[in-house]
Structure formats: structure tokens, C-alpha cells
Image: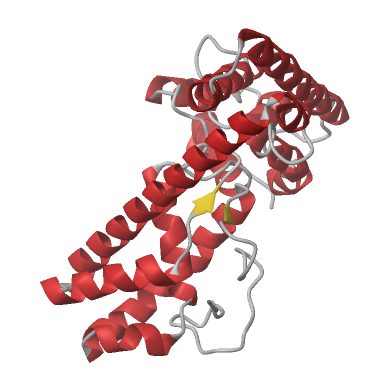
Amino acid sequence: MLWSIGRFGLRAAAAAIVGLSLAGAAPPPSADDDLVDEAAKKAAVEELVINANGNINVAAGIDQMVYGNQAQNHSPQERLELRLQRRIDLLARDATLSENQKQKLLFAGKGDIGRLVERVELFKTRYQNPKAGANGFDWNQLSKEVHPLVASRISLFANESLFAKTLAKVLTAEQQARYEKIERERAEFQHRTGVQLTVLRMSTALGLSGDQRQRLEQLLLTETRPGRGANRIYPTTSFNIVYVQMAHLPAERLRPLFEPWQWRALKRKLENAVRFEEGLVRNGVVLDGGKGPQFGRRGQKQEPASGLGATTK
């Protein structure tokens, strides 16, 4: 897809570029963007335009795609280090870490950050002298090429990271048990929140009675599972986790709860859940428990409520 400035001007073109990067590569609402205000977002848009000749700062576009909205007065590395510090502070509270343990985790996490920043900077060298200006640069293709870096940023301190490996080594058995217990309780609380938000939204949209709300809440608490992510789970993400699972429930479990007209309206709504599922997969959200399907990997054995796939318990 080639962008053309035309009569809309450079500012509009830059806004379109930012919109493309956010839609194609940036994480969903659960990402650590709490340091960003609207002024910073506007500054990020304007930064992409270098001059009135239509030359585009590709490096700034790559930063936007990989790191998301940029906070004022913070470089990408500084933002990641703030995220690391918040992660360690939470762990220290939950598992009662010693200063030595915190320092080891901080050192490991900074190693992960350094490796990611180095990869991003190396990637930028491929676009030091772009052959096309704003009228001909293929930002859609760039968004696809940069996706592995986005995935690495999202799961920066998870999976095979230095931080995750160090955490597994430094925690005592007692600390590990305490940490896992708190994580389970946190996930269960977030799950209940997600269920309540889902019921509230469905009630508002479909005019559910008190009895319908109660039955739907009980069904979702029973038939859906808590989710966990590499980053903090916000209320919006808790809703998405439950909503996507609801869309995969067999129709025979949901249909009896609704009037015929409500059911028809609900099916139309649940058909849109696939876009939420893509965001959850992209943000590294997984469902608790070793059994049962995960997001993005579902079977087709039963008729689901929305036609997306079936959830078996």
C-alpha cells in the first residue's frame, strides 16, 4: 500500500502513517502506555514529517511501530527501563525480594532491553536512505517486516528472556509458592472483573433482565478461564479475554439465555470478536490451565455461538 500526500498535506499524511503503525503493529490496550498523554501522541505524529519536501523520517516511524506511543522526555530505552522497574517493584511486593535479588533482576532485565534496542537500531540501518519519499514509501510492508520486533517488545521479560531465567534462579521455593499464589488470585480477580464487564455490556446492548444477567454471569464464570499476559492486564483486556471465549462457546449453551431477537443481535456482535482475539494473540495473552484451547488455536467440533470455533471444557 503506497501512501500519497496529495491535497491533504503533510500533517494528514503523518497522521495516516501513525494510524497504520498503531493498527498494524502496536499492542492492544494492555500495553504499558500509561506514561503517554495526548500532547505526546501529537508530537509523535509531527516528528514523522521532516520537511516540506515530503521526506519521511523512517527511523521515527519504526520507533513508533515497535515501541508504541512515545512519552515526552523519555527515550524508548528509558520507557522500557521504567516498565522493568515497575515489574521488579511488583515482584518485590509479592515475593518479598531482597535487595540482592532485585539487583540481579534489574541487571538481567537491562540486558534484555539492550538486546532489543540493538536489534531495532540494526533494523533501522536498512532504511537509512529510503528510495521513496512520502508519496511512494510502502509503510504497510514495513509494518509487516517490523512485526518480529514488536513481538519481542511485548514479551520482553517473558519466555526465554534473561529476566525470566534469572527470576527462576533467584526465587526460593517459599518465594515462588507465594508469588504463584498471588498471581493466581490476581488472575481470578481479573477474570471476575472481565465477566462482570461483559455482562454489563451485553445487558446494556441487549436489554437483559436481572435473571438473564445472573444466569449469563454464572455461565461465563463456569465456562471461561482467566488469562495472563506478558504485560499488565487492564480492565479492557479482561473484558476482551472473556468476550472472545464467549464467542467460542457452543451455541446451545448460550442460546437458552436469550430471547430470539436478543440472540440474533448477540450473534452479530460475537462475529466481531475475531479482531479482539488477534489483539490478544499479538499481545501474548494465554489462558490459565494446561488443558483446553488457547487463543488463535481452536477446533471446529461444535457449532460455536459466532461461528469462530468451539471451546470445550
Placement of 74 over or under 180, stated as above or below: above
- Closest to the observer: 107 or 63? 107
Q: Residue at x 77, y 33 (%)?
A: 161
Q: Residue at x 57, y 43 (%)?
A: 27
Left or right, 6 with respect to 221, comes to right
Q: How far from the left and from the top, in percent, is residue 186?
A: 43, 42
- Closest to the observer: 21 or 218? 218
Q: How far from the left and from the top, in percent, is residue 25?
A: 63, 44
**Residue 147 visible, this angle:** yes
Placement of 134 over or under 104, stated as above or below: below
Left or right, 197 with respect to 185, comes to left
Q: How many marks?
A: 0
Instruction: Examine the image and state in which quarter residue 310 appears.
Output: bottom right
- Closest to the observer: 231 or 182? 182
Outermost residue toward the left in this view: 210
Placement of 266 over or under 115, stated as above or below: below
Q: How far from the left and from the top, in percent, is residue 71?
A: 51, 19
Outermost residue toward the front in this view: 174
